[in-house]
Image: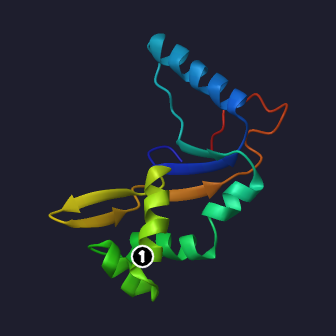
Amino acid sequence: MTGTNVLLVTIGDAASLYEGGREAIRTLQGGDPVDQPAIVTFANEQQLSDVLNERTFTLLRVIRGDEPDSIRETARLVGRDVKNVHEEVTTLEALGIIRFDEDGQSKRPVFPYDDLIISPFAHDDGDTAPATP
């Protein structure tokens, strides 16, 4: 997937994330690039399913495909209440899954990746290789 902007979603613990970050820093300090996708890691399966569920996948498809100009337009496209959509896209933005481009008072949700890969086993115990798609 070279040249593709990928978001990898995994399940793992804080210790493995910390060590992975330290290894990336050592690689960068050595002058080598770190060729890894953006990663969002959840502590457990329940957190993953609480955030990435049927409703949020629908939001991500609409944000990526229809490129709505605002949260209000996003809510209209998915046929949901603006307040509920606002809460969910704000959570997605806080996790780095989407971003907001501000235009005046409107916030345009943007899915800045070419693909999203969910790999719940990427940080399993005993797996010391860096997570790559």
Q: Position of residue 69 (x, y in %)?
A: 26, 73
Q: As displayed, is residue 45 above or below residue 88?
A: above
Q: Disc 1 residue type?
A: Lys
Compared across the picture, whether 10 is left or right of 95 comes to: right
Residue 41: image quadrant is: top right
- Pointer 1: what residue? 83
Q: Can the viewer see residue 27 in this picture?
A: yes
| Tag 1 secondary structure | helix
| Residue extending farthest bottom | 79
Q: Residue at x 47, y 75 (%)?
A: 84
Q: As displayed, is residue 107 above or below residue 47?
A: below
Q: Residue at x 63, y 40 (%)?
A: 132
Q: Position of residue 57 (x, y in %)?
A: 56, 71
Residue 112: image quadrant is: bottom left
Q: As displayed, is residue 41 above or below residue 104?
A: above
Compared across the picture, whether 68 is left or right of 36 comes to: left
Q: As displayed, is residue 54 above or below residue 115?
A: below
Q: Residue at x 51, y 33 (%)?
A: 35
Q: Residues within 10 Å of mark 1 (few under 14, many from 20)?
A: few
Q: Position of residue 126 (x, y in %)?
A: 85, 31
Q: Residue at x 32, y 58 (%)?
A: 100
Q: Position of residue 75 (x, y in %)?
A: 40, 81
